[in-house]
Amino acid sequence: MAGDGVDTMSAFQANMRALLAQGTCSDVTLQVGGDTVSAVQEVTLIKAHSNVLCAHSPVFALELASTWKERVTATANGVASVADVKVPYSLSATKVALDFCYSGAVEIPAGDVVEVLDLSRHYKISVLADAAAAIIKEQMNATNVCIFYSNAVQFNHEQLSTECAEFCEKNLDKILAEDTFNTLPEVVVKQLVASDNSNAEEIAIFKALVAWGKALYGEAGEADGAETTGEETEAPAAPEPAAAAAAAGAPGVPASPAAHPDVLAARTPTRTLKVSLRDRLAPLLEHVRFPLIDGKALAEHVEPTGECAWLQSRVQRCKRRCTRRGSCWQIRRWSPVAVLLLLL
């Protein structure tokens, strides 16, 4: 029985963490990183202890048991034998899991919680998995839900993705104002703006989409103070899908300004950016119900981006969509600018 005032748990945790950090009497080498479930990372070697890993994870126990006899025999013959185990997760997530296995503590940064959930489910560390799921549910708010959502899609967690989607739809007006909205993948952004249940003003959705596009593809041409010409020119045709995909590159990687050479030749740098953004954002902007935006907001926020140049061609489509939703067409909330565009 521990004496009064003696913090035995803290001492135990400190000793176990020191054992992991120093690698004393270790018999397992974890190869962390490499070709992980999320990205290719540098491989880091961590010395660990098979008895600790087996106590928490049946997956580790099964993997280590397969070579246990060979290693025992080698050790009996005076040959040091250490098991090598590949861990296809990031170093930060692996350290969280190891700290839990050695100390019992659950300390998960918000940026790693979904990967830790995936890791703990993979290795069947049930207590850590339950803790990670509880953290996500308790801490989900307008600021961090986009991080959770992006990671849920990345690690293919359908249940968490559904929970994040429902939260985002109910709180989209607040989420659009957060910088983390710009970290969402395109498939998620499209799902949110296309949903009939999303709770946000259409002008807020439009402005957030433009900011998302600029964060993804950069602002070259505007940031350097280049001036636009006062001439009205015909917008060039959008590139073929295959060419656009090749020019855009991998998701999240800013496209090269040379992606649209015909646009560069026809416009100044700032105009080029706007045309490029319009081409890239067109599949998303089709879901914005422009007729619900009043004329003042259209003039102040939409027209300067060049979207009014092609808005007319989409008014009829928006009209049909709004009719199905039972919103603007039924209650005659079309803005004067939208009506004018329809009649032109």
Image: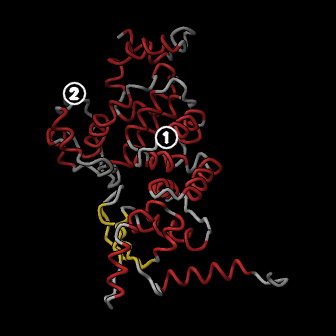
What residue lies at 62% left-to-right and 47% top-to-bottom?
137
- Of residue 136 and residue 250, the one placed in the foreground of this image is 136
1 vs 2, front mark: 1
**In the rendered image of this protein, does residue 219 appear above or below residue 34?**
above
Q: Is residue 20 left or right of residue 80?
A: right
Q: Amino acid at mark 2?
A: Glu
Q: Position of residue 275 (x, y in %)?
A: 27, 36
Rendered image: mark on residue 336:
none
Residue 165 shows in the view = yes
Q: Amino acid at mark 1?
A: Ser
Q: CA distance from mark 1 to mark 2?
A: 41 Å
**In the rendered image of this protein, does residue 98 appear above or below residue 205?**
below
What residue lies at 37% left-to-right and 80% top-to-bottom?
72
What residue lies at 51% left-to-right and 39% top-to-bottom?
159
Q: Which residue is mark 1?
A: 161
Label whose residue precedes the other's in the sequence (1 or 2): 1
Q: Quadrant of residue 268?
A: top left
Q: Position of residue 96 (x, y in %)?
A: 52, 67
Task: Label 1, secondary structure: give it.
Answer: helix
Q: Position of residue 147 (x, y in %)?
A: 49, 50
Question: What number of labels is visible?
Answer: 2
Specify the farthest residue to the bottom. 78
**In the rendered image of this protein, does residue 130 appear above or below residue 199?**
below
Task: Label 2, secondary structure: give it.
Answer: loop
What residue lies at 59% left-to-right and 58% top-to-bottom?
127
Q: Is residue 177 left or right of residue 309?
A: right
Q: Which residue is mark 2?
A: 234
Quarter of the image with the C terminus is: top left
**In the rendered image of this protein, does residue 6 appear above or below residue 215?**
below
Q: Quadrant of residue 83?
A: bottom left
Q: Position of residue 143 (x, y in %)?
A: 57, 49
Q: Quadrant of residue 39?
A: bottom left
